Amino acid sequence: MVLKNAACLSATLILAFLLPLSAQNAAKADQPVLDLSAMDKTADPCADFYTYACGGWIKNNPIPPDQSSWSIYGKLQDDNLAQLRTILEEAAKANAGQDSVTQKLGDYYASCMDEAAIEKLGAAPLAPELKRIADLKSKKAIAEYLATSQFPTSIYGGGSLFTFRSTQDFKDSTQVIAETDQGGLGMPDRDYYLKDDDKSKELRKAYLAHVQKIFELLGDEPERAVTAAATVMRIETALAQGQMTRVERRDPPKLYHKMTVADLDKLSPAFDWNVYLAKNGLGTVGSLNVVTPDYIRVMNATIEKESLPDWKTYLRWHAAHNAATNLSSAFDKETFNFYGKTLRGQEQLPPRWKRCSNDVDNDLGEALGQAYVARYFSPEAKLAALKMVKEIEAAMQSEIQALPWMGAATKQQALAKLQSIANKVGYPDQWRDYSALDIVRGDEMGNAERAAWFEFRRQLAKIGKPVDHKEWTMTPPTVNAYYDPQKNDINFPAGILQPPLFSAKSDAAPNYGNTGGTMGHELTHAFDDEGSQFDAQGNLRNWWTEDDRKAFEERAKCVIDQYSGYTIVDDIKINGKLTNGEDLADLGGTLLAYLAWKEDTKNQKLDRIDDLTPDQRFFIGYGQSWCTNEREENKRLRATVDPHSPEKYRANGVVSNLPEFREAFHCKPGQTMVRENVCRVW
Ligand SMILES: [Zn+2]
């Protein structure tokens, strides 16, 4: 769903915990939440707080060659992957007399690690798919092909031509309906096709060269490959022109167009929706949400305009692209050259074990997650996290009651929404059943294909059934967190409840600044530019009075204007409308964490530690959660696609709005971290 995964780090967010001190966790557990060596005490906290909190870390933590950026979260994700590797290598030992789930984990991982076997097959695992494309007799037959292709029209946002999935109905959150959305591009966003600056032109040239190389790897003569790549670019550019921008997509009512299949058919008669739906077992579905009708119209015109041979070229490219990382090293490396090196600035492919561990996490995430949680996440950690979440929620309740700009009627609705939020910590109560998924040792491509279809069918099977509120959309080892506006729940996977984001050994201040800030962040998403348009039941419904909504939007605009002034790289500024939800969540979340910390420690005498006051330690804990080094290529990519501001501004943008920060560091008016026009919403 479009709004789900309001994930909170750039690729990740936060929360953490005390832990089972197994030998493997001991090193992790010893990492302090407030790290003095990460600071640069020569920097003035009132001039540039981020450098003061993170200057030492930035100097001492160069980006590893296989990464596009490096951060506290990235390091933790790497640590978690190493733990998954341990589990998977044990499971992969053949015939250890293990249960069927462990067997699947081991077989999947072993197949992925068997590079010699994969190399030997070359492009052969793709041959049946390419033959099906070559055999297409008409453009009308594309629908049946997509409904039964090697990889399903992805629910993850890629796919060919469009994406297809199930979702909760925006207007009736008890119902799961089918949904189709824009898709079908090989580059990360429509802007890559449509923008006219030199960098965009350069990337389009690199993309053309990449598509051409893939065609050559499929056996095309270079000349034919050049023409084929140009065809792909022409079709994808036409599709991009019909797509909504990321900013437009932040307005939920613009994403809701429920219609009958007959009406969808009228919108795009050139695509045989009835066949597509029937082949997916949805012949009787009747109606669905068409997120982007304008795109479907453009898709239809493009189907009509382009010839069958050119569509076959487009489909061949997408088939190869979807399968590339499961094919021989020539495909794998060429794909990395464009998507890793050119787009993100990575120097080297990550080692095979990391990629295979990630693949298992993607495809069998709750089977692997169950083993991960048993080993690396204690019941005490879960309880501690739940306690902190409740404290942050209590702080929000007091804040809403005291808000000067909101009237009583809206406050009542806001409080009702807050009270309905479900707190999910660590891992699902019910683990997903993978018994219907066949994993065959030695069949790398087949495993990836069956896993993708298993997930696609699992999604579609929800249509017409009651909503499963226990479901998670992140796996347990993930270093991230999310708020889901339609389920109205906040979710903190076990993977983020780890040192150095939270530690039982630390004083409370940095724990609240770091992990408390994350919890406050997720909670504030329920009331950001998007979340605030959904009610306590997860329905898209306006529960605001007109005046209160106006007052909210004025305050949100203050934050948009503030962040729009920050430069990311070159002359690229933050798109403050794109990042508004995350910026609001950072600002509100940090304040909530501060208030919860004060309340929790109000009867304690807090001492200076390492010559820092408790308030200073709270803010340094917050600031250090954002310590990051990032490659310029990745900064440019994120400027286009990422709703999160760069980490420096997630730190400085927030503290410069907080009088509590100013006092803690004795900052004076006129200094950079003391904004004249202070923004405050929640
Ligand atoms: Zn977020």
Image (cartoon, grey):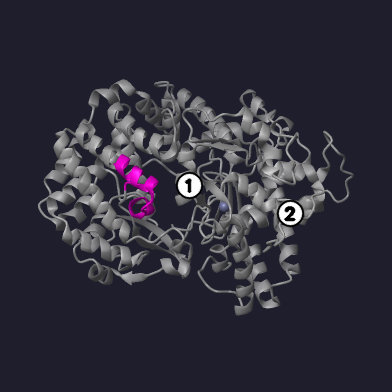
Q: From the viewer's side, name the closer residue of 627 and 514.
A: 627
| Circle nearer the viewer, 2 or 1 | 2
Label 1 crowd (10 A; few <14 / some 14-19 / many >=20): some
Residue 474 to residue 273: above or below:
above
Direction from residue 411 to residue 615 in the image, left or right:
right
Q: Please, what secondary structure does the residue beneath circle 1 have? A: helix
Which residue is label 1 attached to?
A: 638
How dense is the environment of label 2, judged by Cα within 10 Å: few (below 14), some, or many (20 and up)?
Answer: many
Q: The disc labelled 1 sits on which kind of residue?
A: Arg
Which stretch is magenta?
Answer: 186-207
Residue 227 is at least partly visible in this image: yes
Quadrant for residue 219, please give it. Answer: top left
Residue drawn where x is 55% and y is 32% of the image:
80
Indicate whether residue 343 is drawn in magenta.
Answer: no
Asked whether the viewer can see residue 147, the reply is: no
Instruction: Specify whether 535 is left or right of 191.
Output: right
Q: Number of callouts in the render?
A: 2
**Residue type beneath disc 2:** Val
In the rendering, at what x and y percent does residue 602 appear?
86, 51
> Image quadrant for the N terminus?
bottom left
Residue drawn where x is 24% and y is 35% of the image: 213
**Residue under label 2:** 674
The disc placed on residue 214 is none
Q: Quadrant of the C terminus?
A: bottom right
Q: Nearer the viewer, residue 303 or 119?
A: 303
Q: Position of residue 639 (x, y in %)?
A: 48, 49
Q: Earlier in the sequence, mark 2 or mark 1?
A: 1
Image coords of residue 535 (percent x, y): 56, 68
